[in-house]
Amino acid sequence: MPHIRIALSQFRPNKGEYAENVARIGAVVTQAAQLDPKPDLVVFPETATSGYFVEGGVKELAVTAGTLARDLAAAYGGPTIDVVVGFYERFQNHIHNSALYVTLSKQKPEVRHVHRKVFLPTYGVFDEERFVDRGQEGVRAFDTAWGGRAAILICEDAWHSLAATVAALEGAQLLIVPSASPARGSGMDEDGSRLPASVIRWERIVRGIAEEHGVFVALANLVGFEGGKGFPGASAVIDPMGNVVVRGPLFEEALLTAEIDLEKLTDARADSPLLADLRSALPVLTKGLKAGEKREKARQVKFDPAANGASRSTLRAVKRPSPQLNVVGTAADSDDPLHIDVELARRWLVSFLKDEVVRRRGFEKGIVGLSGGVDSALTAFLAAEALGKDNVIGVRMPYRDSSPDSLAHAQLVIDQLGIQSVTVDVTEAVDGYLKQVGDVDPGRRGNVISRERMIVLFDLSAKHNALPLGTGNKSERLLGYFTWHADDSPPVNPLGDLFKTQVWALARHVGVPEVIVSKPATADLIQGQTDEGDFGITYPKADRILYHLIRGEEVRGFDKAEIEVVRKRLDSTHWKRKLPTVAVMSQTAIGEFYLRPVDY
C-alpha cells in the first residue's frame, strides 16, 4: 500500500481524568474517520489519557494495554482504523510511560505493538525516573494494518540518534513520535518565524532523523498548560528528504492530516543511501563494543611508525611558510540576552491564562489588583484578551497616602480595556489594626497594607467567583521585593517568569499606556519610595546580573559592588520563594512523598 493517510491530534487532556480523556480520544478518532479520504492512522501525543505532569498520580492512572485497547474500542465503534495513544501503562507489576498501537474495528481491538519509553528525562522540570520504569524491550519495528512497517519513539527517545537508527535498521518506514515536551525559550526558524526554541530544536531533530534514515516521521505533541508549563503543539509530518509536509499551530488543539507516499522512500534512499551504508558498516562500528578479553586492545587505534628517517625530522628540510592566513571566527555575541519576541510572548501568556483559569480551574472570570503600575496593567491587558473584557474585574485599593497617580493610572487601564471595576479604600482597616498594636515603622505598615489588599482581593474573588491573578515579575521574585503571603498569594501569575525589562517591552507591545510604562516603578507603600531607590541599582542592570547569576555564569561588565548588591538580595531571599518548611516525620509528607500537582 504505497499511499497512506495520517492524522495527528494535537490533544489537550484533562489532567488526571482517564475516562474523560479516553472518551474525547474516541470522539477525535470518530471525527477523523468521517474525513474524506479516511485516515489509515490517527496518532495522539504522549500521556494523552492522563496529562504528563501527574507525579504521584501516575500509579493510580496507569492501566494495562489491554484495558486501554478495550476502552478505546468502546469509545469509538466506527470503521476499522489504526490508532496510536500515549498512556501510563501497568505491565508485569511495573509502570511505564508507553504508547499503544491498536487497530480498532467493530470486532475485538487488535493490539499490534506497545512501546515503553527507554530514555526517561530526570532533570530540570522532568522527574520521570522517579515515577516510571525504563522500557527493557528497546526499540522494535512492527507490521501494521496498512501494509508497511512502523516504529514508535516516545519524546526523549527521539533525541538519542541511536534509537532512530535501530528502528530504521529493523525496517521501519514510518517513525511515530508521541511527545509531551513543554515549550521553553524563543528563537527563529529557517523561515524567519519566531517560535519557542524547544519547538525549533524538535523540528530540527525529527527532520534530521527523517533525512538520515530515509523514513517518514510523524511527531504528535500535547497542547495545553500543566502547572504553568505549556505544551506548544506544532506537531508535524516529515518526509524522507527532511521536508515538513504539514505543521500544526501553536498552543491550540488541532487535527492535522497528511498523505504520504511510501514510494518516496525508494527515491530518498537511492539518492542518499545513508541507511544502506550504515547497514554495511554496522559490524565495523560495533566491533569495539563487543565484550571479550581483547576489548581494551580492540579500542586502541593502530598506526604505522615513523618510516622516513628516525634520526631527524622531515620538517627540517622544509622552509617554514609565512603564517599569513585569513582568521575566521565568530563575532562577539552582542544580542541582548533579555530580548523576547513580544508577539510570541503575548500568544503564549494569553493561551496560558485561557488554559489555567478556565480549563484547569473552572473559572470564567479573573480578578486583578490594579496598582497603577505596569505589572498589574499588563496582567489586566492579557486577562482581557484571554477571558474577555466582561470577565475581568479590576480592583483599586488605595490607602490614605497613596499617590493620586496610582488611582488615576489604574482607572486609565479600566477605561481603556472596558473591564469591570471595584474601588475599596483600605485605610480604615489598616489604620484600625495599627492603632491597636502601635509602635509601627514604615516597613511594617507597608506589609500590613499589602496583606490587607490581598484580604480584599480574595474576598472579592469569593464574592464574584473570579480567580485572583498575580502580577509579580521575575525580577521582584528573585530579589525578594514583595511581601510574603501578600503580593505572591494569587494562585495564577502570567508574569512570574518575565524580568522587569521584559515586562516593559511586552506592555508596550500590547498597548499599555506609555505614561504607566515609563514612570518610575514603585510599590507606593511609603511616600517617595521607588523600587530602584530601594535596590540601589537600576532594573536594566539588575536584570542582566540576575540573568547570569541564576545560570551559574560569571557576570561581566558590571562593578563588583553592583553584582554583590544583586547577589546578596538573591541569596538572602530564597525562603520567600518557597512554601512553609514542614518537619518531615512520615512517608506521606505533603510535597515530599505525597506528590500531587496543584491542578490535578
Image (tube, helix red, strand yellow):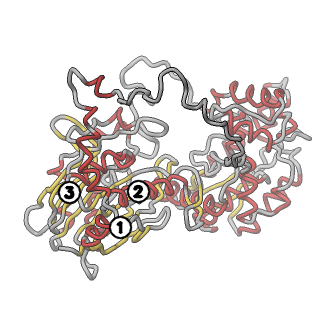
- Occupied quadrant, residue 13: bottom left
- Which residue position holds label 2? 208
Residue 337 shows in this picture: no
Label 2, label 3: how many angstroms apart (C-alpha)?
Answer: 18 Å
Nearest to N terminus: mark 2 or mark 3? 3
Give yes or no for contact between labels 2 and 3 (Cβ–Cβ under 8 Å).
no
Nearest to N terminus: mark 1 or mark 2? 2
Q: Quadrant of the N terminus?
A: bottom left
Residue 100 placed where, x, y %? Answer: 22, 53
Q: Categorize mark 3 by other alpha carbons within 10 Å: few (<14), some (14-19), many (20+).
A: some
Residue 31 placed where, x, y %? Answer: 29, 74
Residue 449 shows in this picture: yes
Dot 3 falls on a residue whose secondary structure is loop
Amino acid type of the residue tagged 2 in the rendering: Gly
Give yes or no for contact between labels 3 and 1 (Cβ–Cβ under 8 Å).
no
Residue 314 placed where, x, y %? Answer: 54, 31
Label 3, label 1: how many angstroms apart (C-alpha)?
Answer: 16 Å
Classify residue 208 as left or right of residue 278.
right
Amino acid type of the residue tagged 3 in the rendering: Gly
